Amino acid sequence: MSAAILWFRRNLRLCDNRAVQAAAASGLPVIPLYVLDDDQLGDGSRWWLQRSLVSLDDDLKALGSRLILRRGEPAKVIKELILETGANSIFYSQRREPLAREEQKAVDALTAGSFEVQSFDDEYMNPPEAVRTGAGQTYRVFTPYWRASLEFGEPDQPDPAPSALTPWSGSLDSVSLAELDLRPRDPDRAAGMRASWTPGEAGALQRLEDATKIVARYAEDRDRPDLGGTSRLSPHLHFGEISPRQVWHSLRPHPGSAALLRQLYWREFSAYLLYHSPRLPDTPLREEFEFFPWVESEDALQAWQQGNTGYPLVDAGMRQLWSTGWMHNRVRMVAASFLVKDLLIPWQQGAEWFEEMLVDADLANNSASWQWVAGCGTDAAPYFRIFNPTTQQSKFDPDGTYVRRWIPELSTGEYPAPIVDHGEARRVALAAYQTTRDLLKSRAG
DNA sequence: TGAAATGTTGGGGCG
DNA sequence: ACGCCCCAACATTTC
């Protein structure tokens, strides 16, 4: 008997998932599969993935099926599974990250004879190749990219989950989640993450429902870490527990939705930039940053990571990150600016720490955002735009409720003095930037 | 999706 | 009443 492999990758959901739809519609017995490659996953991602896989397996069981877990290189694992089962087709959701594209290219190459590979572009609203300037170039600036994306019109209406999946009748080995061992390497973080999140499709849909209640005030409250005015959908979107189409259609009818929906297009834009510039995670897009006099300082990096810089807004953010796997967006900008501009530490080291800590760690979003903050992206905050962590705190946490929540020492008076003087650090950073420009000019001249 | 430095203006205190 | 100064408030420029 023939069968269809349903390969789950980032799209860990049953609703609005075209690979799931197609597998269900094939009428074949379906073998749902997740393959964990030797992972580079950070702690936050590991914690989330483990729970999201449990949730997906539960949802599949409700349809009379179950998730097969295996470890290894996807193309190899899938080839073995084909030999085991005689499956004659595979359905999967495409991904756009450079390594993931290599991975799926190897799977596509399994097409042979009657074996059929069907893949679907599901993770984003618009395909990266389709959004082009009038001259056929790729966009490098967000706003024109966004305008051009809107020309594509509304995203399609989301599909419902299938009502059933024909199970595979044979027995199949599946490694257990315990064997996959996705527990965070730092076990002390688990309790805080558990208290903050419900990974999985049901949790994602609940969070989307909650988001409809904050849409109206989003434009006003989004920069206030003390108010909780953001959607907190990022990890659910990252793991594909919910699709951008679902988010778009459920928020669009609410007054004031434009500001929040615009954020979906930042997600699209980051993926677009990574697709067209695969070196985005490690190489500055602006060439003068090749000459930037970065400072290597293990002590300063650690003070930043541990939330001991002496600047309350920065430290509160870094501690929120450790405790919950997430940091408010405004605070991410301030904390990142502090690392790059006050401490002059290479932005890649900050990006690496975020990848390790975040439950929404996303290569495209994280890389594009760090390049934005560092001023070395194509559409970046200019290098001379330097956040003052004290001013930002009085603007966006005026009563100090956010900083006090994460820094108990503020009340006991044991809080440390700033590790650098911001005014002086700012002058040094501006001089360093001037140096890189001079060097670039002298090389060109 | 900055902030500091510098420039301009206008009201009020004061001789 | 007038000119002068101070300085807050706002605008513009600069980094």
Image (cartoon, coloured by chain):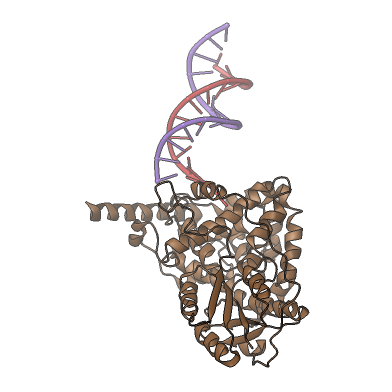
Chain colours: A brown, B red, C purple
Evaluate whether residue A384 shows in this view. Answer: yes
Q: Position of residue A174 (x, y in %)?
A: 64, 90
Q: Nearer the viewer, residue A315 or A438?
A: A438
- Say which residue appears at 76% left-offset and 72% top-offset: A163
Determine the image quadrant of residue A207.
Answer: bottom right
Determine the image quadrant of residue A288.
Answer: bottom left
Image quadrant where one finds the N terminus of chain A? bottom right
Does residue A354 appear left or right of residue A174 in this picture?
A: left
Q: How many marks?
A: 0
Q: Position of residue A213 (x, y in %)?
A: 77, 53
Q: Position of residue B13 (x, y in %)?
A: 62, 22
Q: Nearer the viewer, residue A245 or B8?
A: A245
- Say which residue appears at 70% left-offset and 77% top-offset: A56
Q: Residue furthest left?
A: A445
Evaluate whether residue A343 shows in this view. Answer: no
Does A374 appear above or below A34? above
- Say which residue appears at 64% left-offset and 93% top-offset: A173
Does residue A228 appear left or right of residue A184 in this picture?
A: right
Does A399 appear above or below A79? above
Q: Position of residue A185 (x, y in %)?
A: 60, 82
